[in-house]
Amino acid sequence: MTVHSAAVQHDIHNVIPETASTSSVAAEPKPSPLPQEITTTTTKGIVPLSTITSKIQTRTEKATKPIRAAIVGLGIAGAGFHVPLISSLSELFTLLYVVDSSPPSGITPINARTEGEVTRDDEFSYTREFHDRFGESTRYLKDYEQVLKDEEIELVVIATPTATHYDFARSALLAGKHVLLDKPVTVTYDEARRLGELAKEQNRVLYAFQNRRWDSDYLTLLKTLREGTLGPITDFVSHYDRYRNFLKGTWKEKAVPGGGQFYSLGPHLIDQTLHYFGRPSKVTGFIQNIRSMGDPAVDDDFTVILHYAPTSSNPYVLTATLRGHLLSVREPQQRFVVRGSKGTFSKFGFDVQERQMQVDGREAVTKPDFGVEPEDLWATLEIVGEDGKEVTSQRIESLKGDYQELYRNLANVIRYDEEPEVKWQDAELTMLITELALKSSREGRTIEVSRVEEQSLLNDNGREGNEIDVKFCSSRL
């Protein structure tokens, strides 16, 4: 297994050098000893200096080597986001394995004849198509257990159906791996909290893939809010709407834990809101199926309102309305409307990075226009004059979106103990608000974000073992 950096530091800082005698009587010279292993004394006794030097060297080499990773799940998240992003940062990561129950195109069993074979391993033959998509050093695995047993793997990226997240992440942490967990990180707040505790016990990094903190529009809004241009905020509206009058047939449209439109998009909008405004005082949720398509228990529409009481920095009551609607006829779709005492920020159209990666795969990330929004999607800023009457309007150039920054930060957290941009406590709070919104919708009432409500979600359900078959159902269904 990999040597923990904390253990190396312990050995270095506890070296106790041998000191010369303080006696004033001159000691009789002793003959020089024959060459032998140089040692020093530590809290563990006599240790050869070469051992400590070797540990330092190992740590240094490890810090300069790319993090060896595996991506589990090749659906939209795994193949559409994680593969292009991790492949574009070859100086930081090496993608050794992609794991899914269904083999991707470009590979065949070793005993079958393959046209255009360029590499092979013990089980599969790989074509240029596979390596162009996933990388030269990447191999395919069907069995997740092989990843857990491989001591070379340092990071496991989990992009499988939400209901599998807890068990897959728990298994990886117990195997000594760092974990990047796609959103929503779990089905429940209780599961998120348990994973956080386990990561601390294992001294492993547990990181939530909240990539939309690096959306172009959100970065632009964040800059505007921090500059105080709008004044104290009174109304925050965040949409992720689409027009889809049909079912796609994916697992997200089935009545399974973690299914539905709210679990799919709600955690992104909740995380962005909590990131700037923090913990709300109350939550109101309206989560329903409006299209009367598929299973009526599976939602396709949500409106969640986060209530914020006045504070020392904002004297106004603030409401944050988060909306996801699947019958929205609008192009481009509304994204943000943020109102303050001095102005309004309005934005239409989605961040372009997802679409760019869908079209050009991992090549998209290397292009200079990656994350650059066209001018027709720039936000509009309206500011009231000092007289309180005249309103001026201007377009704001969008900041460049940068999903790669999440992975850069993750690498620095793993290698150099840098502060995570997405703290696990943020992921836990997002799941708490997610569950309270669902509860609010079921019970038809506004719910206080209180310790009492929080504790009511923390029930010991006895999930102490890996209860799922690690030969998981395909994330591409």
Image: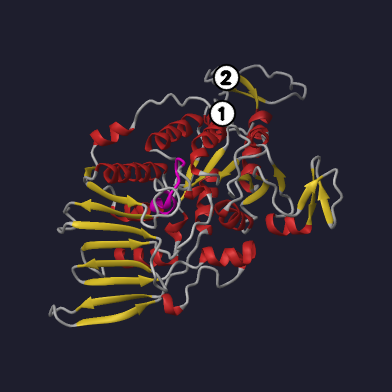
Q: Nearer the viewer, residue 231 or 124?
A: 124
Q: Residue 238 vs residue 445: left or right?
A: right
**Other residues around mark 1 within 10 Å, as few (<14) / some (14–19) / many (≥20):** some
Q: Residue at image x 29%, y 32%?
A: 455
Q: Position of residue 264 (x, y in %)?
A: 44, 51
Work out which residue is located at the far left of the displayed protein and give it.
Answer: 387
Quarter-wise, where is residue 220 in the image?
Answer: bottom left
Q: Please name the residue that numbered disc 2 is placed on.
A: 44
Q: Residue 147 vs residue 206: left or right?
A: right
Which tag, 1 or 2, sits closer to the chain's start? 1
Q: Residue 441 vs residue 21: left or right?
A: left
Quarter-wise, where is residue 443 in the image?
Answer: top left
Mark 1 → mark 2, Cα distance in angstroms:
9 Å
The part of the chain drawn in magenta is: 256-267
Q: Please name the residue that numbered disc 1 is placed on.
A: 11
Amino acid at dot 1? Asp
